[in-house]
Amino acid sequence: MRGGTAKLLTLFCPVTGLVRAKGVLSAPNAVLHPWVQGELQSILDQLDKQPSTVRVPLPDDHPLLLTWRQW
């Protein structure tokens, strides 16, 4: 006999493959669940501590860029 339902809340980062998950008994869709809010805040806090990376464009004759253009 089933004693109710539960939901599995997940946050997934495709870049790192990191999955955060928590089972809860209720999660109204109108607002973020407090667990999700806390997890998102911790992710944002970690981003604030990390130095931002500067992306330098590849030169036109870079081998990777030439291969990409070929395909």
Image (spheres, rainbow, N blue to C red):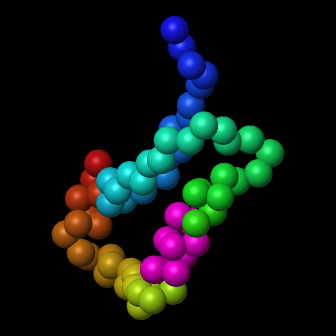
- Residue depicted at 48% across the width and 80% down the height: 47
Q: Is residue 44 magenta?
A: yes
Q: Quadrant of residue 5?
A: top right
Asked whether residue 34 is in view, the answer is yes
Q: Nearer the viewer, residue 64 or 16?
A: 16
13 to the left or right of 66: right
Provide residue 9's location: percent of width, then percent of height: 53, 44
- Residue depicted at 57% across the width and 19% down the height: 3
31 to the left or right of 11: right
- Residue depicted at 51% across the width and 8% down the height: 1
The segment highlighted magenta reads 39-47
- Residue depicted at 45% across the width and 80% down the height: 46
Q: Quadrant of residue 13?
A: bottom left
Provide residue 48's location: percent of width, then percent of height: 51, 86
User: Eyeballing the image, is 26 above or below 11?
Assistant: above
Provide residue 15's location: percent of width, then percent of height: 36, 59
Most common SS among magenta residues:
helix
